[in-house]
Each structure stands twice: as structure tokens, then as C-alpha cells.
Amino acid sequence: MLALLLAVIVFIVLLLILVPLLRARDAGPEASSFDRAVYRDQLRELDRDCARGVLNDSEAASARLEIQRRLLATTAAPVSEASAGSSPIAAMAVALVVACGSVGLYVWIGAPGVPDMPFASRTIDTNGIKIAQALARLKQRAEAEPTNAEAWLNYARSAADVNQWAAATDAFKRAINLGQDDADTLAAYGEMLTLSAKGNVIPAARAAFAAALAKDPNIETARYYTALAAGQDGDPAKAIAMLQALLADLPANAPERADIGNRIVEVAKAAGLPVPPLAAGKPAEPGPDAAAMAAASQMPEDQRQAMIRGMVAKLAASMETNPNDLDGWMRLGRAYAVVGDIDKAADALQRAAALKPGDTGILQQAAQILLGNPPATAPVPPAAVKVLQQIEALTPGQPAVLWYLGLSAAQTGRPAEARTYWGRLLANLPPGGEESKTIKAAMEALRDK
């Protein structure tokens, strides 16, 4: 069908070009005929001048003689048949160029061997559709619960995962304004601002990174972009030094080392500085390599769980020899939570929090790990309650903290305490919203208890 359509188009184009070339052209008027017409007009004008008495007889005779001489001198130049007829050779040349050129061009840059793909047989990217739908649901939930910092944070992270920088920036900002101002969230907000500005570390992003570093001087994202900001300010030596310090603090097998090393090379070359040897990192963290992960995927479930527990035990042993590694304790807490050992997860997370007393960001991460994603009726783990109480003591009034503390009190037979927590939460919510209705319903259910 496509070949037929292209052939029709070529035929129409050739028809428009060749018809004028093949049609015989009428010979145009002789050039001398215009001269004779002019001389005859001059003779008539001469007669009128004589009648008006402008010229005497001798002057008129002399002028007439000259005009007649010129009139006799004009001759008609014959017109050749070739110039007045058709041009078959030119028409043939044009036809060959258009036809052969179009076919050759299609064979060169086209794909004549590719079969047709009817719409019914095309494969639709269902994964992309599912991701977009999930992101839309997260956005709807956040908008329906405008004071739920956790909902905005989930939407922000999901939007960032699919490179929707502007949406992620707005969602992170709203989560921060609702109290989710831990170092990781501040650093993520600064990163979204930077990516939205096409890699330029703008003042708002710098402020976010500075706030993140004030809470956690070792947070990698903030350190990386702060180094880039130094380079953008015209201080490549400082940028390289900061990136080298970041490399030195990373494990030798950290995947982000390659990107940081490439950035050091770029900054040095752009500034005309010698490329320094990259700083060595900390000893490689224990963990499975690619081959071990591939092998684990083929194992039966019981063997795979045994392998995972072995890796967790190996990480725990390494932490005993490096007890000041805050990130390591956080990783260990997550690992214990994954295998369902909540008590050990809580202990590891408390060890991390003890390294930075008063840092609610670490405590918030610990609470999220311990809470997981349970059903609404699931008991709140006592370890999570302990962490939530610490957060409440440091930064009172966070909505998610008040909700879970009230839920825990209701589940453990303390209705008055639950109503107190939820009453404080209700006072900070817009009246008439779905969230307010849910809390009022929960408080009403406690009235007779």
C-alpha cells in the first residue's frame, strides 16, 4: 500500500514537471516588429506636426526620409523550430532524475525491508502506563490530605524517580513545610531544584543543601552539589578538594564513585588544572556481588532467606568493628527490618540516632523503617512508638507522629490519651476535609471506651 501511494505521488509530480516541457511553445513576436510599429507611429506624428505648422517642408522631408530609411532597415529575424517547439530530451532527463533519485534516497535512508505494523499488532508500553497511573494516585492522595507530610514525601520521591523535577520540587517543599525537614529530604529538595535548573546550583538549592549539612555534615548528596556550586562560582580547586574529600569518605565499592571521579576530571580539564589521582575510599562494604545476586534469584525461598540472613549477619559483624558509622547502622536497621527482626532493627537504628543526638531526621527515618507499610488496623510496633515519642519530644505537633501515637494509645487501651493526641492533630487540620472526618470518626469510636 505504501509503495503504491509513493508511486502515485511520484507520477503526479512528474506530470506537473513534464507537461510544460513536452508542450510545443508558440513562437513569440519578432523583435523587429516592435521597431516597425515605433517608426510608423513616428511617421504619423510627423504628419501631425506638419499639419500644425510645427515643421516646414524641408525639415519635414528630411525627417520623413530618415524615418523611412530606418523602417526599411528593420528585418524580421527567423525563429528556429527548436526554440519554439517541445523539449523531449529535457523532459526525459528530469523524469530519470526524479524517479531514480527518489527511489535511491528511500533505499539509502529508508527501511524498505521492514514489514508493516498494523495498529492492532503493536505492543503498548503497559509499564509506563502503570507508573503514570500510580504517580497520579499518589498525587491525588497528597492533594486530598494536604497536611500529610508523608503523603507529599511519597509523591515527591516517586516523581523524582520518573524525572518529573518540577512536580518533585513542589512536593518536597510542601513536605518540608509540614515538618519533614530531615537532612535527606532537604538534600533531595535541593537536588530537584538543581535538576530543574538544568544542573545550575541556584541560591534556593544552596540554602537547602546548607540546611541539610547543618543537620548531617556527612550527607553525600548535599556535599556533592555544594562542591559543584564551588566550581560554578569559579573556584575549581575548591570543588575538586570537596569532591576528593567525598570520595575518601565513600566505600571503595560504592557505585557513585565513578560519577564523582568523572566530575573531578571534567572540572580539572575545564580549568586547565592537572587531573589529580582519585582519593581512595574506605574498605569495601560487605555485601553480595552481581554473581551472588544472580545465584540468589535462582535459589529456593528457604535458601534465599538463609543467604540474606548471612549477609545481614556479615554487615552486623562489620558494624561492631566500626561503631561510629552512622550510615552503616541505618543500613543495618533497614536490613533487619527486611528480614522481620524488628527488635534488632530498632537497636541498630537507636545506635545510629545516638551518634547524632537531637537529630529528628534520623529518628524520622528510623520510625519509617520500623512502621513499614502495615494495614490501618495493624498494631503499631512498640519500638516505633518509642522512636515516635522521641520525635514528639524534640519537635512537637508533627501530624504523622500524632496520628501513630494516638493509634498506639487506642490499640493498647488508653482512649483518653488517644483522644488527646488526635485532638491536637485535628486542631491543625482544615475543617471539613477527609482527613478531619477520619479523625473525628476515630475519636467518636473511642467515646464509650
Image (spheres, rainbow, N blue to C red):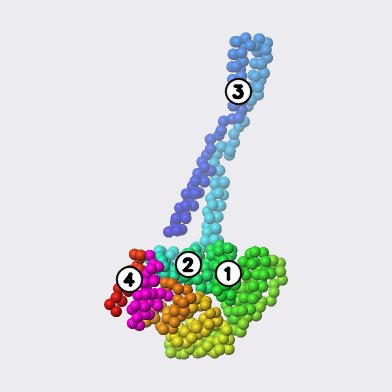
Q: Are marks 4 and 3 in contact (CB under 8 Å)?
A: no
Residue with the mark numbered 1:
210
Which amino acid type is marked by label 1? Ala
Mark 2 residue type? Asn
Whether the magenta-drawn stretch holds residue 406 is answered as yes
Q: Is residue 212 above or below residue 40?
A: below
Q: Which residues are magenta?
A: 401-430
2 and 1 marks in contact (CB < 8 Å): no
Of callouts 2 and 3, the N-terminal one: 3
Cβ atoms at labels 4 and 1 below 8 Å apart: no
Label placed on residue 177: 2
Give the x, y percent position of residue 76.
61, 28
Q: Nearer the viewer, mark 2 or mark 3?
A: 2
Q: Nearer the viewer, residue 121 or 378?
A: 378
Q: Label 2 vs label 1: CA separation?
A: 17 Å
Residue ID for mark 3:
38
Q: What secondary structure is the magenta-colored segment mainly?
A: helix
Distance between the alpha carbons at the discs numbered 3 and 1: 93 Å
